[in-house]
Amino acid sequence: MKIIPISGALGAEVSGLDVSVKLSNSQTSELYEAFLKHRVLFFREQTLSAIGLLKFSKIFGEPTVYPFIQGLPDVPEVIEIIKTEADEKNFGGSWHSDTSYMKQPAKATLLYAKEVPEYGGDTLFCNTNMAYEELSEGMKKLLCNMIGINSSEKGYKGGRAAGMNRLNAMKGAYNKKSKSFESEHPVIRTHPDTGNKSIYINKSHTYKFKDMSEDESKPLIDYLCDFMVKPEFTCRFRWRKGSIAVWDNRTTLHNAINDYQKKRRHMQRITLEGCEPR
Ligand code: SIN
């Protein structure tokens, strides 16, 4: 197995590994260490059933169900993310950390490409620990006791709701009973495995700081969210059929670029259970 970084900030491509076969203990620990170090790992030319994807995901954590989309009938932890030729909005098309509106947000996410456009539909990632480290001591001090309020509805300007309604109307899988979620989390969180600190807000879900109004919060939310996605804190992944990405939501944000209108993109996704951010 070879693990080669793809940018100076985060992300590494793993080659020489067929993830559909049972991996040895040393391979799985090497992968987990690489996941912590590089924050997002990429695999190419993999062929996996939904069950195979589920088994592979367990190297990185415990699969769980995603609250807004019903999973596959036999493998409920696997959801389908499909943008058709007719859809205009995409799923996840703004910078975010998955399910940060939950009390225990997702630890990690796996995405497996079943069909991709010839070009377009790349995914961007940023390293929120690197961004934290680059803040001034004064800003770190200001943020260290602040709490962000994260909502699954408020503040979300991306394509999730519209895209999902459309996707699920088509597939008949929209979970209409699903309520919205809101949770308070520290603005600076400490990674439970590495002890590193990261900025833990995002424009998609964090709509204010605790004990502050939305108007008062907005300028600082905007400043930090724009700061975190400076090009030098990011990497960009170009998908091919059979590619897999697995990212650590505790120390990254991601953004699915919506630049492939009238083309189809079909992914399968698994969310891994996380703990309460501290
Ligand atoms: C997501 O936010 O999980 C979607 C990412 C993508 O489709 O590239």
Image (tube, rainbow, N blue to C red):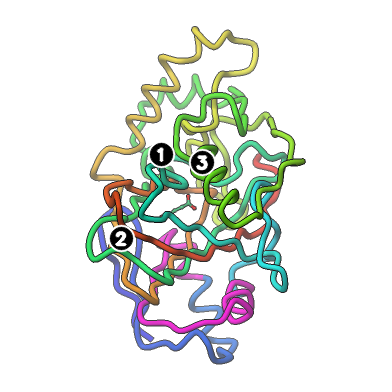
Q: Amino acid at mark 1?
A: Ser
Q: Secondary structure at mark 2?
A: strand
Q: Please, what is the three-letter code of the amino acid marked with disc 2?
A: Phe
Q: Which residue is mark 1?
A: 94
From the viewer's perspective, tell me whether residue 125 is left or right of residue 252.
Answer: left
Measure how far apart labels 1 and 2 are at the Cα level: 15 Å
Mark pair 3, 1: CA separation: 9 Å
Task: Find out whether residue 240 is within the magenta segment.
Answer: no
Q: Which residues are magenta?
A: 33-58
User: Sequence order check: which comes first, mark 3 or mark 1?
Assistant: 1
**Circles 1 and 2: CB distance less than 8 Å?**
no
Residue 46 screen position, x and y as percent: 42, 82
Dot 3 and dot 1 residues touching (CB under 8 Å) = no
Residue at 52% over, 87% down: 20
Among the 4 quarters of the image, the one containing residue 238: bottom left
**Image height of 51 relative to 65, above or below:** below
Q: Which quadrant is the C terminus positioned in?
A: top right
Q: Amino acid at mark 3?
A: Arg
Question: Upstream in the sequence, badge 1 or badge 2?
Answer: 1
Could you classify mark 1 by the number of other residues whose Cα lies within 10 Å: few (under 14), some (14-19), or many (20 or more)? many
Q: Which mark is residue 237?
A: 2
Residue that label 3 marks: 160
